[in-house]
Amino acid sequence: MRARSIRGTGAVAAAASLAVAASACSAPGGDKGAGGAKAATAVVGIAYEPDTLSPLLGYGKDGNSKIFDGLLTHDADMKLKPALAAELPKVGDDGKTYTFKLREGVKFSDGKPFTSKDVVFTYETILDKKTNNAAKTELDAVKDVEAKGDDTVVFHLKYPYAPFAERTVLPIAPEHIAGKQDVNTGEFTTKPVGTGPYELVKWSKGEKLSFKANPGYWGGAPKVKNFTMAIIKDDDIRATRLDAGELDGAILPPNLAKKYESDGNKKSYAAKTFDYRVVTLPTGNKVTGDTAVRRALDTGVDRKAMVDSILDGAGKEAYGPVPTDSPWFTKGTERGHDLAAAKKILDKAGWKPGKNGIREKDGVEATFPLWYLSGDKLRQDHALAYASDAKKLGIKVEVQAGTWEVIQPRMPKDAVLAGGGSPADPDFDQYTLLKSSLAGDGFNNMAHYDNPEVDKALDKARESGDHAERQAAYDTIQRDLVKNPGYTFLTHIDHLYVVDKRFGDLTTQTEPHDHGLASGPWWNVEDWQPKQ
């Protein structure tokens, strides 16, 4: 729900330009007259920074981590292809064993060889109860991991988990380094070593992540030798720095990205996504915990207006975590905007108009706080629009901004304008979003949603290897979210990026919620061919 993992050694001029990138008031591109140095350097503006750089704690679990590789990775069309594995896995035992042959000659950036022991170490460490990885439930199907020699790994599953191959894009950590440290607090969390196309130069928290090309990368040394991700949480400031030439590219909200469509030096990219914006309605709040209030808000919100006015059409209405154009979407679960119907739901449930038009029931006023992340203009706009729609129903929503440090302790009782979404498989997002046993587990099930029928369907969909059975289970879940919504889903958002044209024609993937860090046109920066 939170973008939390949501994510060189060239000429002297290039190194100097990288150093300049540390300053928010200096141009990260450095000496614009040094053609070769400029071409070998890229500085992009992102909105979030990771909590950690250790894959053992969740960094890069969806791929594209730059410092690391997984056994598999995705191409531009989101199809799986080999990375540290030499080929796609052989699946046996009715879907309960996955055998990977490893690529030969791969080394970590410190020169040590990559072997099957590193794969076993990575997965076993993530699954260890002592490891603080909130995403470990994603590997619930894994019974054990077996190394057969240095070049083969076999995963044994408890049940035929259909999307397991998608889980093997998660990065592999070096046992010879990470295995000698405390997994939760060791130096590896901020100074990682991997097999990926880039090496970390420095992580200046709250400011930037600086990388240099790995000259020994198995896929070939990247042409962009120095790559910097400038962490700029405020959308307006990110646009200002792009205008000033301090950034070579940036992710921007639709209203700020629009002006670059006619810019002759920059190119805009729109990436289709599964990324949604949603309001959590915690069951621990006397107002949002009432199913009638949740149903009324679900019916009374004007999603189309949000897509048109907030997103400038760069997105679509959301009725759940699954986009309406996905084959997993359950037709008939769309909810139209109907104020009259929403008011009737509240009337019938005993929420009567009170002072100043705000409804009341049993002495409780229909009001609750709604938090959004400071500096995030899209979330702010969604929150304000939601509050406006709620007011028409007689519900007072108090919109407030804060950091995650302020927001997280309040999540059990306060609503949050949150985000989520994963394109790989419906299990990836719905399980952690809705499973009752995960309520209060970090940013999992932020609404503390508790629905036994949904729990059963989530387990059935996860543990079945049959597509039709899985589809039926997800249909059940989506229909139950109409009858008993724990969240108000608002929009699915297209991600918009602006990049200097000197990097040529770039591509994007279908993106998850955690964007900017590992997604965007720089999802494959190691393959860029910049103009000199």
Image (spheres, rainbow, N blue to C red):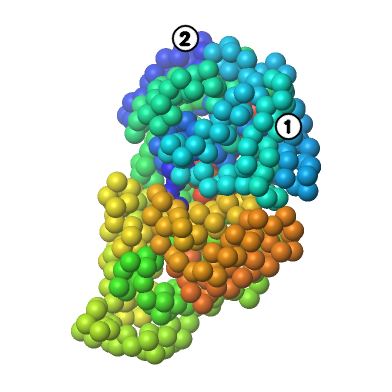
Q: Which residue is found at the position 67% from the left and 27% from the top?
A: 147
Q: What number is the disc on residue 484?
A: none
User: Which of these two is toward me, 500 or 376?
Assistant: 376
Q: Secondary structure at mark 1?
A: strand
Mark 1 Cα-neighbour bin, 10 Å: few <14, some 14–19, many ≥20: many
Mark 2 residue type: Val
Mark 2 Cα-neighbour bin, 10 Å: few <14, some 14–19, many ≥20: few
Q: Is residue 215 above or below residue 205?
A: above
Residue 283 at x, y percent in the picture: 37, 68
For the C terminus, give its image quadrant. top right
Q: Is residue 341 left or right of residue 151?
A: left
Give the mark nearer the N terminus: 2 vs 1: 2
Q: Secondary structure at mark 2?
A: helix
Instruction: Determine which residue is flagged by label 1.
Output: 100
User: Which of these two is toward me, 143 or 246?
Assistant: 143
Q: Which residue is found at the position 62% from the left and 32% from the top?
A: 70
Marks 2 and 1 sit apart, C-alpha to C-alpha, by 42 Å
Mark 1 residue type: Phe
Q: Which residue is found at the position 41% from the left and 26% from the top?
A: 182
Instruction: Determine which residue is flagged by label 2.
Output: 12
Residue 504 at x, y percent in the picture: 63, 32
Image quadrant where residue 466 sits: bottom right
Can you name the residue that lies furthest to the top here?
12
Image quadrant where residue 278 sits: bottom left
Q: Is residue 487 above or below residue 162?
A: below
Q: Which residue is found at the position 28% from the left and 65% from the top?
A: 369
